[in-house]
Amino acid sequence: MSKKDYSSSEEEEKEVTTNRLYVGNLAYSVSWQDLKDYMRNAGNVTYTKVLTDYYGYSKGCGIVEFETVEDAKNAVSELNDTELQGRRIFLREDREDFKSKKRVTTKKEQTEGKKVYVGNLPFSMNWRELKEHFAEAGEIERANMLMSRGRPKGAGTVQFYDEESAKKAIEMFDGTKIDEREIFVKYDDFY
């Protein structure tokens, strides 16, 4: 079977039964907004996400959700094997389509927007000190120092009970110093 036969848009279009698509081979510079703008050529886009690693770097793939299944079929038909920022992208039905399955709340969904990642911390800092330092932003459910082989990595996470406290922590502490080290604070999107 030739490559063309395997990835023919007619065959792919028949397989699309959901409004959620996986997009592969994205350039690492593509943002969620770039992806959304490009996918609007096929229909109404309701959600886009570029998948990232622990450090926030693109994994070169993403998810696009359209308003209708027809829009998703149209995207596969028209945008599969087209060029976006110098790379030929491919589209297929997302294999992790959660809407077609019974919804179970994941741990990530329970903490999404409530957990922050703190980088460039002093290696001598422990979780209690981290928790005390961030307590000014709001009530903390949990604080952890990240370790590797029993040694501190100079980073940690702080999970708040509400999203507003996490937002406040980022605003208050990002770019501040602890023991002469400038820390950075961002939403923890590792999963």
Image (cartoon, rainbow, N blue to C red):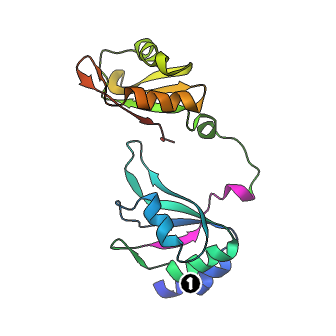
Camera sees residue 46: yes
Camera sees residue 2: no
Left or right: 3 in relation to 107: left
Which residue in the structure is indicated by mark 1? 9
Residue depicted at x 48% and y 41%: 189
Q: Position of residue 60 (x, y in %)?
A: 41, 60
- Quadrant of the rendered structure where residue 45 is? bottom right
Left or right: 111 in relation to 59: right
The count of marks equals 1
Span highlighted in magenta in the image? 89-100
Residue extending farthest to the left is 180
CA neighbours of label 1 inside 10 A, class few (<14), some (14 to 19), many (20+): many
- Quadrant of the rendered structure where residue 114 is? top right
Q: Position of residue 32 (x, y in %)?
A: 46, 58
Position of 51 relative to 1 (above/below): above
- Quadrant of the rendered structure where residue 44 is? bottom right
**Mark 1 element type:** helix
Q: Examine the structure image and report whether residue 185 is included in the region drawn in magenta.
A: no
Q: Position of residue 144 (x, y in %)?
A: 46, 22
Q: Examine the structure image and report whether residue 92 is included in the region drawn in magenta.
A: yes
Residue extending farthest to the right is 102
Q: Amino acid at mark 1?
A: Ser
Residue depicted at x 48% and y 29%: 168
Residue depicted at x 51% and y 30%: 166
Position of 94 relative to 188 (above/below): below
Residue depicted at x 50% and y 65%: 36
Q: Position of residue 15 (x, y in %)?
A: 66, 76
Position of 24 relative to 106 (above/below): below
Closer to the camera in the image, 119 or 1: 119
